[in-house]
């Protein structure tokens, strides 16, 4: 993976699941990782494990719902490594529920993390990428960003939004400023994600879907593939789901 080597990669939601696995894989291929999430102990542990394997990583505790914190993260990456090549907007939550449960706080949290968090990331790195006339933003959407199931209305809405924002970024920034935009849409992946579900009626059907989930390394490989493409090749969207998923 020659094009991964020495790239400075910011990844949000690096403290578990897909983010953690992707960070480890990219670091093993020679990228310089900037790890972000809210749980410092997990970030520190991951940084140490990457360094133990001979890789390079720094971390910054970041809540993506705060633009100031995300801007500070991008600035920290730039101060430390002198550039920002790739942003992976991966942080996300999935408290699925039926609309009639009226879980308004959970809807707001999903909108804040899954949509505003992605926008904050783009806003924070865009000046650096435009200045350099090169960059790559990878946004994690979902199969739920392509289709609906009972209980997924708001989560799906946030993931449809992620796809819209990514395509908007591509149209506005790819041709002129050489900034690539990639959507990665995973199906059921075995992580902590479904632990945020509080609606008992949705939980049981989701357990069914996740009984055939794949491991996060399958998504990490797709992300690494996109990062490794040469600058003139824009890989715009990948869907990765369990073979057994409908
Ligand atoms: P995890 O729950 O394992 O990871 C979610 C990550 O997001 C954690 O590292 C968490 O870190 C971080 N996070 C949550 N809220 C915030 C916040 N406010 N600020 C910063 N970081 C935050 O789940 P996955 O690895 O599965 O999820 C990663 C992405 O993949 C998400 O966007 C999810 O929607 C998407 N996805 C996952 C699928 C799956 O089946 N697992 C399927 C389709 C898409 P911390 O709590 O430390 O802040």
Image (cartoon, rainbow, N blue to C red):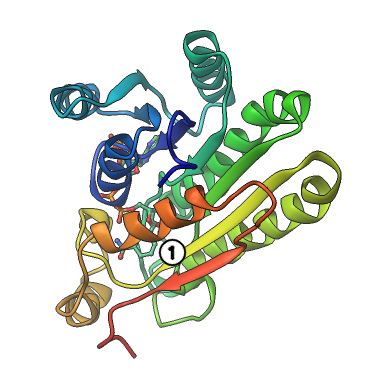
Q: How many marks?
A: 1
Secondary-structure class at tag 1: loop
Q: Is residue 66 left or right of residue 100?
A: right
x 33%, y 40%: residue:
29
The percent coordinates of residue 121 (x first, y second) are: 58, 35
Residue designated by label 1:
102
Please state which of residues 200 and 213 is positioned toward the viewer in this rendering. Answer: 213
x 53%, y 15%: residue:
72
225 shown above or below 121? below
Residue extending furthest front? Answer: 2
The percent coordinates of residue 229 (x first, y second) are: 54, 53
x 20%, y 25%: residue:
54
The percent coordinates of residue 31 (x first, y second) are: 39, 32
The percent coordinates of residue 182 (x first, y second) are: 58, 56
Residue extending furthest top? Answer: 79
Q: Is residue 171 left or right of residue 202?
A: right
Please state which of residues 217 and 148 is positioned toward the viewer in this rendering. Answer: 217
């Amino acid at each position: 993976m020659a094009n991964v080597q020495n790239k400075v990669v910011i990844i949000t939601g690096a403290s578990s699941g897909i983010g953690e696995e992707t960070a480890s894989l990219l670091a093993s291929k020679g990228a310089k990782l900037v790890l972000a999430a809210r749980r410092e102990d997990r970030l520190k542990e991951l940084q140490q494990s990457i360094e133990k394997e001979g890789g390079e990583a720094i971390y910054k505790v970041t809540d993506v719902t705060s633009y100031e914190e995300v801007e500070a993260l991008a600035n920290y990456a730039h101060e430390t490594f002198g550039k920002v090549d790739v942003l992976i907007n991966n942080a996300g939550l999935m408290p699925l529920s039926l609309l009639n449960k009226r879980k308004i706080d959970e809807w707001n949290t999903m909108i804040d993390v899954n949509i505003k968090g992605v926008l904050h990331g783009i806003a924070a790195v865009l000046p650096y990428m435009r200045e350099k006339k090169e960059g790559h933003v990878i946004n994690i959407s979902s199969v739920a960003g392509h289709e609906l199931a009972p209980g997924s209305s708001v989560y799906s809405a946030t993931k449809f939004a992620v796809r819209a924002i990514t395509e908007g970024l591509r149209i506005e920034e790819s041709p002129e400023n050489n900034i690539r935009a990639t959507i990665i849409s995973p199906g059921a992946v075995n992580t902590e994600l479904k632990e945020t579900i509080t609606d008992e009626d949705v939980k049981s059907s989701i357990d069914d879907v996740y009984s055939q989930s794949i491991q996060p390394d399958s998504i990490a490989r797709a992300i690494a593939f996109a990062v490794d493409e040469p600058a003139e090749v824009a890989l715009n969207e990948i869907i990765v789901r369990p073979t057994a998923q409908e």
